Amino acid sequence: MSASEDQAFAHILSSYPELEAVITAVGVLGLPCAKQVSVADAVTRTVIGQMLSRHAARTIYERVEKLSIEKGLDGGCKLSIDELTGLGVSGRKAKTITEFGQKYDKAPDTFEVWRQMPHGDVVREVSSHWGLSTWSADILSIFYFGFEDVFPEKDGTIQRAVSIINDKHYNGASFDPYKASPYKTYLSLYLWQMVDQNII
């Protein structure tokens, strides 16, 4: 358990005392290890994962990765739209992946710098690309860039968790995720776990 994890756990407990039982049931959480992949690959994985279960997304991405390796390509974004759709990627997602991959290839450094940008700038940059959104930027920031203070308000599971909390009137007022700052990512992880583990 790191000092940062301890501090985040203590901060979230103190910010949401009415949720102490469910937070404690989840236990101390650490940030996901930022995956050491290119931003192009991170975008490919994120786009495939949108609106799919983790299992379905993993299965499709494994197919994409396998074919790209077999073809000697540097990442799934180098596959054609037809190849991607043939592996189970929707047409819209395939277009997003290939278009982003083409832009990335022209100037990879301008995209790799996203890892060091403030989150607000990442949201602006990511959202400027066709098919990418604030949700995409938030997921990239949490799982690939290691940011500590991100709350993906557009995520379906997060919205469900907040709705359940508000319906049960844990705090007698609307749930305020910004009280978790500067550890909103940890709060997001707790809410995902609360739903996944049927704790709330």
Image (cartoon, grey):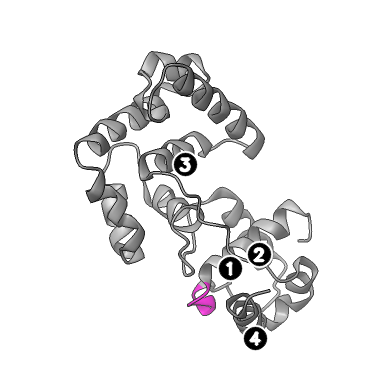
114, 167: nearer the viewer = 114
Residue 95 as seen in the image, left or right of residue 1: left
Q: Nearer the viewer, mark 4 or mark 3?
A: 3
Looking at the image, tell me whether mark 1 or mark 3 is earlier in sequence order: 3
The quadrant of the rendering that contains the C terminus is bottom right
Give amino acid for label 4: Ser
- In the rendering, which numbered label is found on residue 46? 3
Looking at the image, tell me whether mark 4 or mark 1 is earlier in sequence order: 4
Find residue 30 and report its image quarter: bottom right
Give amino acid for label 1: Tyr
Alpha carbon distance from label 1 to label 3: 19 Å
Structural crowding at the residue carrying mark 1, measured as other residues with C-alpha within 10 Å and reported as few (<14), some (14–19) or many (≥20): many
Give amino acid for label 3: Thr
Please check the rendered image and state whether residue 112 is part of the magenta-colored stretch, yes or no.
Answer: no
**1 and 2 marks in contact (CB < 8 Å):** yes
Q: Looking at the image, which residue is at 61% across and 61% down?
A: 189
- In the rendering, which numbered label is found on residue 190? 2
194, 3: nearer the viewer = 3
**2 and 4 marks in contact (CB < 8 Å):** no
- Residue beneath disc 1: 186
The quadrant of the rendering that contains the N terminus is bottom right
Which residue is most to the front? 72
Alpha carbon distance from label 2 to label 3: 20 Å
- In the rendering, which numbered label is found on residue 172? none
Magenta segment range? 178-183
Alpha carbon distance from label 2 to label 4: 14 Å
Q: Looking at the image, which residue is at 43% across and 43% down?
A: 42
